[in-house]
């Protein structure tokens, strides 16, 4: 048997299925579209759900894909064994009400035995225990003896996912030979050892589960199959595990080369080598689909994967950043199947290196925090780190439990692991409850789900702002109706429309739909599944009915202003790439008649010079009066022409390419000005960070800029009036005022200080001796925290060695301060622990270091009682 490589096997499968009449579709993004039930795509069928349920018409009734998938359920075991991984590719062929069991079974057998050349005698099918139909196909048609077909129960051979479509499955196992077996008598298909490997799973979707275990037969039966590409490669290449197949092995070897370690020499090193190999694959693919490392949702999954890989790099002794170098190997190994990896290369490297640098800083910060926790344990004579603290290190500083454990073990400490798991579970419950409850489709059910799937809308708005068309469907907020009356809210669907529906960041059009008998105000236009445009609004007068021909009129002023802002975002994206670098990627945009918002990947705040330069480039392109041209072309042809595509966007085979002279070229379905000069002016009003590695620019165009400067001018006149000065003198006048304020503040501080010392009386009379340590505990009035610290420093100077405790009552609150000199600390005094005890009396909390600590409290009437308690608390601390 020929040992085909991963890239060859992927192509062989897709070519084979294409020869059986399947449409080969590209892998969908790892980010689910319109499906809230999933964080990440985890199976080949997940992005195809709308075709299975009939909510959308598939491009063909037979489809095949190689889908990138991520599953993190086993993340804790990755590396510990050679079986587990988070990223994999799933080969699949799908039938939407076309062929069924007979073809699916025959083709899987033909592909494995005739195309790939696996030994037929080593392949064993399994079927669901009650599925005689599948059993007979394997037995009577394919010719496999009955004793080699295994019947398994619901647990193994019935696919269902709560309510929704479900059905029995038939799996195919391959016997890899005794060398992979457990050696136990009776070891056969279904054994947990590595000998019999499940290669392919055919799911026969023939039932609908109502969620209570009642099954009805579907009128449209579907086929959903899945075969792990890496698993197939393990079998074909006859290697130990996925870490030994050609492309992954090349990556694993690079990890060994960078770290100077040898694989299969030391178990702990192997764990790290495998973990890094797996995690960098996941991270590279996730970033290529536009996912950024953040602290929630899928961004958190990515951050966790990158940080785990970086941490295991440290364990292997790798110095400095190394993930981008590994990512390059992932890209080289997989770009044949996933060209987007090569396209986004620069960006992927930038995100990885940035996150790695951040983590290195965080880990050092975490080590300092852990040092403080050790200090506290030492002072309290404890030997166990609380679960709460261990979780804080994990959650805030990305410290895995094993890292904390390792560091503490060296110093003779342990961790309350049960407490850690409890804190972890609390967070999981929080995450679970924040997930939205959705239907099988992972979308909120609405009245629009009931509209016939064949209803679609043609968009005529590129060339027309008014259009006559026929009403196909009318709905209120709750049901489909045949007419809408005056005062009713609802949605109008027509065959053709000039109204643009919200897409690609451009806000939907508003306007009116009318006949001689009725007028409907369109407040928003939305795009729904299956290419339907919904005109959402209310009936202002009269009545509209299904089947009527209506006149649709878009609000022209709003559309024209929106177009100016939309065209400006294209110019801005090009300007930012020019000024900041090619790693800049659009992460989102919002285009309305009033303004534009543009989110982009960049890793630090823009400088005022960079903002000015980008703004100037856009205005230059506006003044150059560049023609704006739109061409419809094939997606591949468009990309070859250098048109920029957006992250995570699902493009059709035919796309619109919008060019603005030689300056900008992007794939875009939105509406635009005819010439950049129509934009008139462009002004950036703000630039800020909105997430890790994502910046946001807000800007204005045309009349919006003129209005902006009018407001600025009005504000300047208001300010000048308040300062009793001319607008030209405002800056000078403010400088004088600031100098006056500074002088007054300084005078105020020195008066406060004198007052505080005066209110203390003769301090030295208040010093008491606590087991040989001097303690000065006193109450003062009306001093803030800064004043209290200054006073504390002065008193510490006066007493030489000892402890100072001060309480200041200020506006109904108490500020507390404790300071301990070096000699007092040596005797056992700890300012942080002392202040905790004192603060409790005034109903407050706080803490700090052994030498200085501060706290606050809300019961001023107990301030003197707190001061009186200081001596007793200090006495317990001193050896």
Image (tube, rainbow, N blue to C red):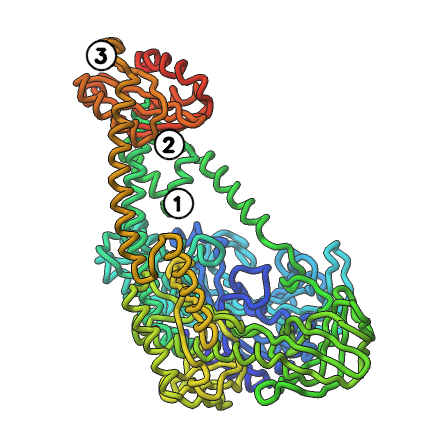
How packed mark 2 is, by other alpha carbons closer than 10 Å (few <14, some 14-19, many 20 or more), is many
Q: Viewer-nearest of labels 2 and 1?
A: 1
Q: Mark 2 touching mark 1, by CB under 8 A?
A: no
- Label 1: which residue? 396
Marked residue nearer the N-terminal end (2 or 1): 2
Q: Is residue 503 visible from the viewing direction of this image?
A: yes
Image spot of residue 19 (x, y percent): 55, 86
Decide: is 495 above or below 72.
below
| Residue under the image location 41 percent in, 78 percent down | 681
Q: Mark 1 touching mark 3, by CB under 8 A?
A: no
Locate residue 237: give its quadrant. bottom left
Marked residue nearer the N-terminal end (2 or 3): 2
| Residue under the image location 51 percent in, 80 percent down | 563
Decide: is 331 above or below 195.
below
Q: Nearer the viewer, residue 401 or 36?
A: 36
Locate residue 395: give its quadrant. top left
Where disc 3 sits, the SS reads helix
- Label 2: which residue? 385
Could you give the CA–CA distance between mark 1 and mark 3, rounded to whole angstroms?
Answer: 46 Å
Decide: is 478 above or below 818.
below
- Label 3: which residue? 764
């Amino acid at each position: 048997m020929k040992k085909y490589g991963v890239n060859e096997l992927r192509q062989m499968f897709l070519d084979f299925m294409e020869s059986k009449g399947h449409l080969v579709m590209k892998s969908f993004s790892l980010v689910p579209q319109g499906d809230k039930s999933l964080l990440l795509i985890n199976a080949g069928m997940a992005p195809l759900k709308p075709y299975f349920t009939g909510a959308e018409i598939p491009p063909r009734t037979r489809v095949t894909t190689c889908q990138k998938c991520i599953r993190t359920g086993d993340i804790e075991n990755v590396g510990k064994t050679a079986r587990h991984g988070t990223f994999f590719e799933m080969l699949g062929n799908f039938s939407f009400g076309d062929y069924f069991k007979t073809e699916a079974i025959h083709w899987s057998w033909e592909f494995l035995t005739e195309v790939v050349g696996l030994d037929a005698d080593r392949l064993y099918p399994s079927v669901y225990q009650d599925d005689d139909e599948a059993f007979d196909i394997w037995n009577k048609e394919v010719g496999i003896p009955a004793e080699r077909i295994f019947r398994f129960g619901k647990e193994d051979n019935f696919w269902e996912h709560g309510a929704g479509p479900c059905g029995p499955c038939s799996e195919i196992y391959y016997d890899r030979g005794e060398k992979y077996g457990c050696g136990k008598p009776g070891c056969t298909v279904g054994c947990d050892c590595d000998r019999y490997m499940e290669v392919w799973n055919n799911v026969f979707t023939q039932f609908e589960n109502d969620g209570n275990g009642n099954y009805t037969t579907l009128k449209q039966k579907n086929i959903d199959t899945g075969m792990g590409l890496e698993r197939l490669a393990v079998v074909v290449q006859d290697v130990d595990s996925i870490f030994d197949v050609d492309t992954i092995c090349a990556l694993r070897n690079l990890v060994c080369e960078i770290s100077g370690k040898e694989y299969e020499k030391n178990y702990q090193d192997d764990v790290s080598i495998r973990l890094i190999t797996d995690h960098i694959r996941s991270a590279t693919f996730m970033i290529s689909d536009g996912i950024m490392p953040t602290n929630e949702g899928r961004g958190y999954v990515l951050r966790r994967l990158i940080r785990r890989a970086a941490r295991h790099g440290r364990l292997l002794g790798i110095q400095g950043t190394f993930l981008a170098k590994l990512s390059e190997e992932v890209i080289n190994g997989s770009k044949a199947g996933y060209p987007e990896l090569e396209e986004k290369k620069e960006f992927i490297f930038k995100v990885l290196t940035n996150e790695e640098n951040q983590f290195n800083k965080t880990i050092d910060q975490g080590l300092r925090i852990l040092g403080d926790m050790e200090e506290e344990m030492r002072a309290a004579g404890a030997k166990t780190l609380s679960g709460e603290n261990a979780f804080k290190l994990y959650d805030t500083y990305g410290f895995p439990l094993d890292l904390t454990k390792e560091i503490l073990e060296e110093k003779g400490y342990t961790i309350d692991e049960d407490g850690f798991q409890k804190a972890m579970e609390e967070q999981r419950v929080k995450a679970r409850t924040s997930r939205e409850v959705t239907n099988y489709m992972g979308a909120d059910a609405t009245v629009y789900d009931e509209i016939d799937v064949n209803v679609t809308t043609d968009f005529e708005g590129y060339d027309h702002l008014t259009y006559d068309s026929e009403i196909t469907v009318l709905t209120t907020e709750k049901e489909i109706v045949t007419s809408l009356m005056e005062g009713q809210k609802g949605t109008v669907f027509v065959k053709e429309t000039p109204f643009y529906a919200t897409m690609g960041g451009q806000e939907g059009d508003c306007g009116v739909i009318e006949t001689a008998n009725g007028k409907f105000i369109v407040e928003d236009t939305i795009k729904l599944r299956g290419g339907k445009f919904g005109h959402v609004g209310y009936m202002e007068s009269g009545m509209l009915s299904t089947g009527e021909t209506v006149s649709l009129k878009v609000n022209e002023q709003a559309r024209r202003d929106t177009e100016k802002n939309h065209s400006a975002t294209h110019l801005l994206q090009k300007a930012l790439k020019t000024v900041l670098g090619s790693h800049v990627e659009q992460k989102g945009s919002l285009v309305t008649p009033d303004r534009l918002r543009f989110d982009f990947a960049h890793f630090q705040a823009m400088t005022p010079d960079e903002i000015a330069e980008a703004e100037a480039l856009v205005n230059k392109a506006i003044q150059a009066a560049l023609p704006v041209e739109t061409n419809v072309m094939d997606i591949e042809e468009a990309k070859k022409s250098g048109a920029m595509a957006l992250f995570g966007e699902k493009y059709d085979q035919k796309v619109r390419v919008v060019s603005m002279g030689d300056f900008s070229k992007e794939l875009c379905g939105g509406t635009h000005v005819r010439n950049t000069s129509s934009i008139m002016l462009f002004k950036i009003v703000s630039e800020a960070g909105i997430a890790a590695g994502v910046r946001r620019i807000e800007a204005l165009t045309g009349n919006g800029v003129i209005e902006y400067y009018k407001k600025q001018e009005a504000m300047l006149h208001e300010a000048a009036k308040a300062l009793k000065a001319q607008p030209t003198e405002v800056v000078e006048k403010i400088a004088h005022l600031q100098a006056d304020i500074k002088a007054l503040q300084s005078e105020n501080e020195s008066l406060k200080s004198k007052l505080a010392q005066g209110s203390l009386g003769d301090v030295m009379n208040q010093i008491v001796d606590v087991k040989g340590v001097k303690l000065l505990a006193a109450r003062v009035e009306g001093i803030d925290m800064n004043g209290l610290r200054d006073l504390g420093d002065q008193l510490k100077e006066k007493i030489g060695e000892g402890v100072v405790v001060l309480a200041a009552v200020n506006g109904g609150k108490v500020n507390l301060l404790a300071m301990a000199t070096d000699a007092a600390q040596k005797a056992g005094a700890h300012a942080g622990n002392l202040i905790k005890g004192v603060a409790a009396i005034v109903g407050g909390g706080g803490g700090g270091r052994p030498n200085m600590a501060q706290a606050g409290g809300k019961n001023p009437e107990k301030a003197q009682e707190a001061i009186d308690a200081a001596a007793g608390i200090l006495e317990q601390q001193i050896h």
